[in-house]
Image: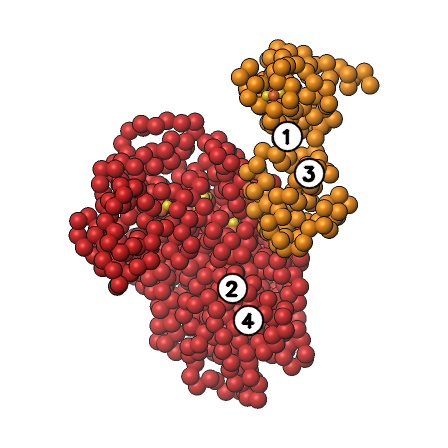
Chain colours: A orange, B red
Amino acid sequence: MKPGIAEVLEIHEKGKRDSLIPILQEIQEKEGYLSEEAVVEVGKHLDIPSSRIYGVATFYNQFRFQPTGRYHIQVCRGTACHVLGSATVLEHLEKLLHIKAGQTTRDGLFSIEIVACIGACGLAPVINVGGEFHAQVDAARVAEIIDEYRKREETI
Amino acid sequence: MDCTIEVNNKKIAAEKGELLIDALSRNGIRVPTLCHMKNFMPSGSCRMCVVENQSNGRLITSCSYPVEEGMKIQTNSPRVVESRKVIVELLLSNHPDDCLYCVRNGKCTLQDLAGEHNVVERRISGKKNDHHKDLSSLSIVRDPDKCILCGRCVRVCEEVMDVSAIDYINRGSRSVIGTAFNKGLNVSSCVNCGQCILVCPTGALSEKPHINEVQMALNDKDKMVIVQYAPAVTVSIAEEFGLEPGADLNGMLNAALRKMGFDRVYDTSFSADLTIMEESAELIHRIQNNGVLPMITSCCPAWIKYAEEFAHDMLPNLSTCKSPQQMLGAVVKSHISEKEQKDPHQIYSVSIMPCVAKKFEAQRENMTHRGITDVDAVLSTRELIRLIRLYGIEIEKLEPETADSPLGVRSSAGKLFGNTGGVMEAAIRTAYYALTGKDLVSFRIPEIRGFRGRKETRIRIGDLELGVAVVSGLKNAHLLLEEIRNGRNDIHFIEVMACPGGCVAGGGQRIGCGESDILARMRTLYAIDDQETIKMSHKNPEVAELYREFLGEPLGHKSHELLHTSYMKRDVML
Ligand code: SF4
Ligand code: SF4
Ligand code: SF4
Ligand code: FES
Ligand code: FES
């Protein structure tokens, strides 16, 4: 078992099903996502079938099941960003990268996550790419941004 | 009855706290349902069963609402009727609408409800479902586009089978039923029992079809096509052809199969007898040589896969006997092919089973000898019915015929395999004879008969007291195994059938059979046992002949090569 998973399970009582969500959160915190191994191990620990855990985890938006890409993109879907068109931003990103929120591109470069207000409402709509904020983005700007990161990769 | 309620302005007697739907049905009012399942906790998720509570004007779900004294109910007020209709229309709004191309055409609850509610035009249109079909399993096909999310499959899989291969995933409009990580059913913990197919109201779940392969073989002049049918099949098709439920169509089925062009027609009950010869010898061997006990039967492939996944600590307890289906296949492609001077590659071996797990079993790697598969195609009872219709055979009008010899004569003990408890009863009869040299005087063992999911008894055989247990429904198997793990040691022999009630209620049987149909099938199998003269597997003359001519002895060298197998721990996502 991966040490990250083991560490989390160690501090949670065996068979205590109420701890499911906190355990999943803590594992995602450590590992960045919920791997198959994580789901199976949590299942053993709490005596819950893996299909149920996956079902519960997919019910919430916060969990992802693929490791994040090198450039993890957070799209703010808070109110301010929403009003100024974050839905279109998200839609364009998904089309451009051929992935949905929660997924990672095949080359492992990009992943998308939807987040609630990230406290930069003045700059709405905002996205955060690998820790760098981009303000007042729209469809055209999104394409440029992705291009910039791709270029950056090539020059490395 | 301890209270009175008013339904459609008429007083009826009811039981306080019982489900409203039960009180209504007792009084001749059928309420349409989708998610409701008898004997399960109500889920109340589809709202198809709404009725109007006149006391407060609310629509309530009758499948989950308890009866209260003095309730006033309307079951077909305009509000009720309209609301049910809208539910059907909403379900249809994203449905593929390809009924004519659907395996469940004519046997679909959604279709029926649309008809009953007079849905004749599309008032609500939505985006059509667009998911991938899951064709990965050797037994089950999943078509999530046709799923109406009633959750019946999920509940059967968890509550009856203790497997939980599937569950609701995602949320809201993106909800689907799927496995962990939405992977193929083939890499999930699914044990292929097919019980989910039986409860699915639509075409979202069905068996992996083998009809085309069988037709192709039948059309191939170079192939000798042999067929075998399981004990439960002959008593499970009568209703389909307008005959009494549970009626035995054995002779007519023989005739029908010959009309379709099968070159040899064999009865799997013959190899059930063969299984009993091997299995009872194995049991005695284990008892006399301090072998691993309790021994557990191995003829149900869904149980075997369950054990390989969830109970691999018990694999040494499993009988090494192949199932009757595989035994018959193996004998055909060795002994019969020799006798008939046919290259085994020219023989195409078909079986007709009340089961979809048998499709998986036939393709297990170790179900071959010298690279030759025992069984090439497995049809479910449902596919048999389709084939009978496809070939235009009016089975109800045929003159009965007998099965082909050898491998056509059976004892009524072999026929009992279709019922839960049947394998056990047959095995006890033969073990008794093997140990005492005498036949049981009263051949019936009533304690292990009947539909119950868990049965136990003790049988005196000479100075041995044999403890036996019979379980059906894998949840019951799980509970029994837990007792054994916790130290119970008074049981020597256990029969496990995955399907509740045994193969008469198998996952390959007709859709829409009720408990009364299944009980009728059970009764017929016991009636056959009462009426026929050969009641013990060791008295089957053709089985004896096969040992003389070919196999030698139970557990002998040839048996080991052809009739026994091994199991392995399976790593799947549990
Ligand atoms: S076939 Fe049986 S084990 Fe598999 S999903 Fe259906 S109910 Fe569950
Ligand atoms: S697959 Fe069938 S039984 Fe399962 S939820 Fe969908 S419609 Fe219901
Ligand atoms: S109980 Fe019978 S029908 Fe059901 S899975 Fe087992 S062998 Fe098949
Ligand atoms: S709503 Fe997007 S940063 Fe606050
Ligand atoms: S049948 Fe009552 S809510 Fe589904």
Chain on which label 1 sits: A
Q: Residue shown at 51%/53% (left/top)?
A: B158
Single out the mark in the foreground, 1 or 4: 1
* Mark 1 surroundings within 10 Å by alpha-carbon count, few (fewer than 14), some (14 through 19), many (20 or more): many
Q: Residue furthest right?
A: A156
Q: Residue shown at 42%/55% (left/top)?
A: B40
Instruction: Give the side of residue B289 with respect to residue B263, left or right.
Output: right
Q: Residue furthest bottom?
A: B463
The amino acid sitting under disc 4 is Ile
Q: Secondary structure at mark 3?
A: helix
Q: Secondary structure at mark 2?
A: helix
Have a look at marks 3 and 2 and say if they share a chain: no
For residue B318, above or below residue B348: below
For residue A25, above or below residue B544: above
Chain on which label 2 sits: B
Alpha-carbon distance for marks 1 and 3? 14 Å
Alpha-carbon distance for marks 1 and 2? 40 Å
Residue at the disc numbered 2: B476
For residue A148, above or below residue B459: above
**Residue B154 appears in the rendering:** yes
Labelled disc at residue B494? 4
* Mark 3 surroundings within 10 Å by alpha-carbon count, few (fewer than 14), some (14 through 19), many (20 or more): many
Alpha-carbon distance for marks 3 and 2? 36 Å
The amino acid sitting under disc 1 is Gln
Labelled disc at residue A28? 3
